[in-house]
Image (cartoon, rainbow, N blue to C red):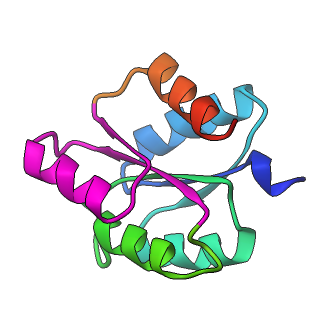
């Protein structure tokens, strides 16, 4: 499978992971799952997904740190990142974009909107 079809879903909330996993499969993508920041970094380097849907508030390494590390590494800097977070304040969104995210969406999310953002970023 080409890396352009690989999507990494990073969230510690099982219902969100299940929902996004189903949505990505239904749209022809190959999803990978990470439940925390450490797993996200390992899977990103191993699978080189085209895009990561990344939560911010997680145990251990948070989403901001994951994004900074991936964008700061020449090998993984090209991976598109969508933050999907319950943090909806202006400061949180600005910080997310400043650490390198391509998009910032807030929970609860609209499946049509998130799919459209994924497709737009991967064109």
In the image: residue 98, left or right of residue 4: left
Residue positioned 72% across, 34% down in the render:
25
Q: Is residue 93 magenta?
A: yes
**Quadrant position of the C terminus in the picture:** top right
Image quarter of residue 33: bottom right
Residue 96 in picture, x, y percent from top left: 27, 56
Residue positioned 43% across, 79% down in the render:
69
Residue 84 shows in the view = yes
Q: Residue furthest right?
A: 1
Q: Residue furthest top?
A: 112
Say which of 55 and 70 sits in front: 70
Residue positioned 45% across, 63% down in the render:
35
Residue 56 shows in the view = no
Residue 39 in picture, x, y percent from top left: 51, 74
Image quarter of residue 56: bottom left
Residue 70 in picture, x, y percent from top left: 50, 74
Residue 24 in picture, x, y percent from top left: 65, 35
Residue positioned 61% across, 73% down in the render:
76
Residue 7 drawn above or below residue 58: above
Residue 53 drawn above or below residue 61: above
In the image: residue 9, left or right of residue 55: right
For the record, the magenta segment spans: 78-107
Say which of 24 and 69 sits in front: 69
Q: Is residue 108 magenta?
A: no
Residue 28 drawn above or below residue 64: above
The tally of labels here is 0
């Amino acid at each position: 499978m080409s890396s352009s079809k690989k999507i990494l879903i990073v969230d510690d909330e099982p219902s969100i992971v299940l929902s996004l996993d189903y949505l990505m499969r239904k749209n022809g993508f190959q999803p990978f799952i990470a439940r925390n920041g450490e797993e996200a970094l390992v899977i990103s380097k191993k699978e080189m997904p085209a895009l990561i849907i990344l939560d911010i508030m997680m145990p251990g390494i948070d989403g901001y740190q994951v994004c900074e590390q991936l964008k700061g590494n020449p090998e993984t800097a090209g991976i598109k990142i969508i933050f999907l977070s319950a943090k909806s304040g202006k400061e949180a969104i600005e910080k997310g974009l400043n650490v390198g995210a391509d998009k910032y969406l807030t929970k609860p999310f609209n499946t049509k909107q998130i799919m459209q953002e994924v497709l737009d970023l991967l064109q």
